[in-house]
Image (tube, grey):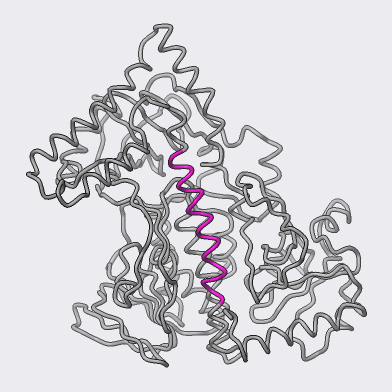
Amino acid sequence: MPEVTIVGAGATGCTLALLLSRYGIGCTVLERRTDPFDHPAAHVVNARSQEIWHRASPPLARRVSALAPPVEEVSVVRWCTDLHHAPLGDIDLLADTEQVETVQSHSRFLISHIGQHRLMPVLWDALEIDPHIDFRRGVGIRDVTITPSRATVHTDSLGGKAEISSRFVVGADGANSAVRDAVGIAMRGPELANMGSVFFNAELFTDGIRPLLSWIYSPAFCGVLIAHADDDYVLMTPYLSRHQEIARDGRMFWARTLPRVIGQHVPFRIHSTGTWTMTSQTAESFTKGNVILVGDAAHRFPHTGGFGLNSGVQDAHNLAWKLAAVLEGRAPTALLDSYEPERRPVVERFAAQSVANHFRLDDVMDGLGVSNRAVARLTRAFAHPVVDRSPAVIVRSIADRLTSVAMRRTAKLLGDSASARYLRATVARRLPDQLEHFASTGLEFGYAYSGPLIRTEPTPQPMDGSGVVHYRPTTWPGARVPHIWLAGDGDPVSTHDALDLRDYTLFTLDPQAWRAAVADTAPVTVVGLDTAIAPERQIVLDLFEVGEHGAVLVRPDGHVVWRTTECAISAAPELQRLLTGFEISLATEGVAS
């Protein structure tokens, strides 16, 4: 019997399985699909996710990175009334060269544009070849039952019904999680819009810049075009009612709509169409007994910000080392009680930013075209049972009419009148205020944990809670340990590569003294920062903030537990008390107490 059953082989489930495999822990991964979903969903893969995949498998991280186009090819975000005429304005994410250099210093990786339809085959291949992972495709979930010591997944597949019992079941099965429903955990939060999309191939932008995102506002269409590799694109737009053609017959709708958007004489080939509901929802609880929810099963965000896939990968990262410690007998089950208290504040911050990004888009057009605030209100109205059950032809007619009226307002931007020129210039002036939507390094690296597993300091947290664009590396307890290159026997290694898989890691510029002071029995690996590759020593001192003789204690997931500016002889007793205190807290009270 497996110790862990993971339901769902999306990015979150794959990451958890691969991280557990590093400990030699076997798991069964159940996936209802037989092949990866080929309709793109997420397309923003941030550097933190790539760091986590590198932690699971450096070759895997290299394969994922190889999927990304050069950053200069996907750095422009555009607003326009027509794809083939002068834009209303652009945001070039590489325009601030100083900021770009700063971001490049934070990690060995950069935020990348990788369509999920290209990412998932790579992750599935990694599951297939891993000897510790039993990957089963085409398996549906009928039910999940819980006992005090185990959880059982009841499945359906071509081979018939089966039961899989394991110590823990992890629901990584997405927004419509069967695991979450089976154990009776509700989602709370608003629905913001119904979205329809088409994935297609066409040769666009042959004479100039190929924007990563093109926000289109025209009397014929309002929505966003996302550029993917090999002349593939995703075009999205909101709709109001399930009775509209975009929801009933998406292929027919898009076959008529695409020529109006990309040009009547531009050949295209539709790969797939789809609909989904944009929400900002969080599960009432991330755990029930020995069932744990991760990724979209636990929290759903608007796509505005790119936090969805990446936050799921972070969930898996937070959970993996704790599951391993419990399953290997190095920690009591109470350690898992820290998962939700650490992750919930982080994902709620991401959700708030995503929602803010979504509604901030209205500020660009301000009365021109389709308003996201109006769409949210109308979506709720059309979902009302009285409206939804009205004759479909009437509901469809009203929804289509309201959409058409909203889009016609964009006509004010067209033409060469003084009024149109003024409005276009006004839109362009508003674009810099949208930067947080597309550049969120402060949230990408700057999220921090708190709670009984972190020795919080009385000083204020140095990461500005409202900071989104800019990130300042810090060793403040709870934060991600800063990245810097260390000299090794061969190639340089990152501080993240030096993290011990099971024990704490102590980073210091005075490793000899700390190795002598730390007891041989303490679960601590000392790593010297004296080999850091930096133009000057002061850079290292500024980055780690503990002086020449202090130290920074870091968990296996790379988050700082404790730090001191005192020397080894003075601070070693405090370190020992800290480690002993963690053990007592886990054993007697549980981390959630």
Q: Reply yes or no: does residue 327 show up in magenta.
A: no
Query: Measured along the vertical axis of the image, is residue 150 above or below residue 483?
Result: below
Q: Main secondary structure of the magenta part?
A: helix
Identity of the residue drawn at 55% across and 62% down:
345
Quadrant of the image occupied by residue 117: bottom left
In magenta, the rendered stretch is 338-359
* Residue 183 in picture, x, y percent from top left: 33, 78
Q: Nearer the viewer, residue 306 or 192?
A: 192
Identity of the residue drawn at 47% across and 54% down:
351
Quarter in which the C terminus is drawn: bottom right
Quadrant of the image occupied by residue 266: top left
Query: Measured along the vertical axis of the image, is residue 148 above or below residue 66?
Result: below
Identity of the residue drawn at 18% across and 43% down:
251
* Residue 408 in picture, x, y percent from top left: 27, 22
Query: Measured along the vertical axis of the image, is residue 311 above or below residue 200?
Result: below
* Residue 141 in picture, x, y percent from top left: 26, 76
Q: Reply yes or no: does residue 349 show up in magenta.
A: yes
- The residue lying furthest to the top in this view is 417
Identity of the residue drawn at 9% across and 46% down:
390
Question: Is residue 186 left or right of 382 when viewed as pictured?
Answer: right
State the count of labels.
0
Quarter in which the N terminus is drawn: bottom left
